[in-house]
Amino acid sequence: MQLAFTEQQQAFRAEIRSWLQANVPAQPLQTFDTEEGFQQHREWEATLNQGRWGMVTWPEALGGRGCDLIEWLIFEEEYYRARAPLRVNQNGIFLLGPTLMEYGTEEQKARFLPAMAEGRDVWAQGWSEPGAGSDMAAIRSTAQLEGDKYIINGQKTWSTRAVWADWLFGMFRTDPDSERHRGLTFILVPLNTPGITVRPIPQLDGLPGFAEIFFDNVEVDVSNRLGDDGAGWAVAMATAGFERGLMLRSPARFQETARRLVELYRANEASASHDPQIREAVMRAYLDAESYCLSTYQTACRLSQGGKIGAESSTNKIFWSELDQNMHATAMSILGARAELLAHAPAAEGVGTWLDGWLFSQSGPIYAGTNEIQRNIIAERMLGMPR
Amino acid sequence: MDFTFSEDQLLFQDSVRDFLVNEITPERLRAGWETDTGRDPALWQQFAELGLTGITVPEEHGGLGMDAVDFVLLAQECGYVALAEPLVNHALVAVPLLQDIGGELAARWLPLAATGEARIIAAVEQNLMVEDAHVADLLLLEREGQWFALEQGQFSCERSESIDPARRLYSVTVQAGTAPIVEGARANALRAACLNRGALGCAAQALGLAQRMIDLSVQYTAERKQFGKAIGSFQAVKHHMANVAVRLEYAKAPVHRAAYAVAEDASGAALAVAQAKLMACEAANLAAKNSIQVHGAMGYTWEVDLHIFMKKAWALANTWGDAGWHKQQVAAVIFADGAALGAGATFQ
């Protein structure tokens, strides 16, 4: 055990820190749930890519730096410290990218990865359907193979950032006689294909952060299939694997929220001290965010030494989603009567972005497998309780 | 950056776990409750033969020369079996303290600690009660900024009974006229280090206790049937245990980091230990709460083994600094001006 960064790791930290200082936009970008903000974020992805900071874990040949998980965590720490923009193409670069590298043909990698890295192609996910939420194996949207085309029919929903995205990856039932997780195929679909209708769905903040997508005899070339026909479930499970989940929600994000919460508490201590639970909750935020960081480092070190990830990784999502919700609830308590005010409102002095964070934190226990589903997985696969 | 245990450390943990689980059965623990001392010299002798009594004693004094990182995994296993013998205090707290004190006292007692001939116990002001004072061959006791090195006969003990029959707790009175061995600033530094080590020992044992309560509950709910099914198949029961598993999983790395900070005598050790103890004892307390719930009325009985582990978990949460004390340590750091918080600060 040696809990200090190597000189090489420190040099890496210094390099990304100075690049971010020089390049992070002075004014925060607009939210990517608006058309203009989406475009700003797309341009930011191109800037990152030019600096070879777009996806540091990717191989050098693909514009990455071949970083290991520890360097990834360092990158994330500096990224969130610098308050750099959120990643509009996170579904692409963090989830689909590594899956393409594992399952894609050489032709597919050349076709999709550079455009993804440059922010030219922004990706949305297509998993959930009206009848397939927590029960993802209940997918009913079909893709019928005819010649060298799949003909897609059906409906996907809750597709984050699909309103302005260019592509969608998802699972479709290619064997009409199949049931559950068999007979599903992983297909990449351009969202401008005729027969596709994208209907924006306003989220809690009123902005169209996700969409439902209707497919009416949509023709997609068979070369857009990732992995084998009928093997979609295995490909999808790889996409949802631990390391990719880690990339979506690295500890740095929550540690920065905890740090800002301590600041918010100290700035409002006179009023916040009327409720003694607030101080306790702020401390709890710090403890849990630190623990999440420590556990992630421990797991990353174990994995980088050839260790295998086990069922205990399913505890991850419950921990960070509840942490995020608790931290923002505490911020709301500190802000008191100001908590409900929109950031631009005249009386909203000092409210910052806490309200946006509070709204978003409500989605954490729901998306990427509800926390109830996660608890079932923990009980059955990690603890061995009966089905 | 290497946050892993070595293969040797993990193998040692495995062999100690096998030994403890075989030897320290709930039946043996219950038998120990009925004896005068509640402690088992034969078992202590076995620890000595395994090298455990000398694990942290320097090699020149006949020990293995290991540190808190080596021992923390073993302390978890001690928790898993609710070990009553004072091995964690002896190896993790008292022996390193004795080394810090140094001089003739250390030269005389460290070899005896290594062979297991002497059980050494340490306690500080924050310990209301001194556990195992009655079997201490050498008691290193801090009171009001003074350290005393006491052999049996140099202090008197009055036992106060705990709800955990395995715990032997004493109010200790130092014989009038006994001279302290260390005073002043150095005594305070020793107390701080000692408290860190004692709290780390509680935290590590709490991890083991929580795991044991999970294991007992998983086993019980797989066997117990209601409505024609194992109750462990019901989501309401599963989710109780999953919640414990989540809190336990995220308490482990803080405990291991605290062990590292203690071994390295790092400046942030007190914070790391406070965090570890709070996280681990909360996980163990949640394990106790949810385990008794899924055991139903069985969990409320003396006969079912759950209470052995539950009561120890409750007690450890308030030993070597209660939660309030450790929260104060955390608050003093994070609410200070210029505190190093946020992304990238964890290992600075």
Image (cartoon, coloured by chain):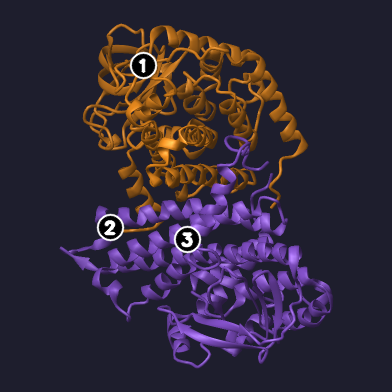
Chain colours: A orange, B purple
- In the rendered structure, which disc, 2 or 3, sits on the residue that comes first in sequence? 2
Under circle 1, the secondary element is loop
Q: Around disc 2, counting alpha carbons within 10 Å, would you say few (fewer than 14), some (14 to 19), or many (20 or more)?
A: many
Under circle 3, the secondary element is helix
- Please state which of residues A61 and A224 is positioned toward the viewer in this rendering: A61
Image location (x, y in percent) of residue B69: 66, 60
Q: Around disc 3, counting alpha carbons within 10 Å, would you say few (fewer than 14), some (14 to 19), or many (20 or more)?
A: many
Q: CA distance from mark 1 to mark 3?
A: 44 Å
Depicted A343 relative to depicted A373: above or below = above
At label 1, the amino acid type is: Ala
Q: CA distance from mark 2 to mark 3?
A: 22 Å
At label 2, the amino acid type is: Val
Image location (x, y in percent) of residue A120: 50, 10
Residue at the disc numbered 3: B281
- Position of A198 compared to B125: left or right? left
Protein chain holding label 1 = A
Residue at the disc numbered 1: A162
User: Which numbered disc, 1 or 3, marks the residue closer to the eye?
Assistant: 3
Q: Around disc 1, counting alpha carbons within 10 Å, would you say few (fewer than 14), some (14 to 19), or many (20 or more)?
A: many
User: Which numbered disc, 2 or 3, marks the residue closer to the eye?
Assistant: 3
Q: Is residue B39 visible?
A: no
- Position of B11 compared to A96: left or right? right
- Position of A362 compared to A227: left or right? left
- Please state which of residues A196 and A56 is positioned toward the viewer in this rendering: A56
Mark linked to residue B237: 2
- Please state which of residues B140 and A245 is positioned toward the viewer in this rendering: B140
Q: Identify the residue at image location x=65%, y=46%.
A: A305
Quadrant of the rendered image containing residue A335? top left
User: Which numbered disc, 1 or 2, marks the residue closer to the eye?
Assistant: 2
Q: How many marks?
A: 3
Protein chain holding label 2 = B
At label 3, the amino acid type is: Cys
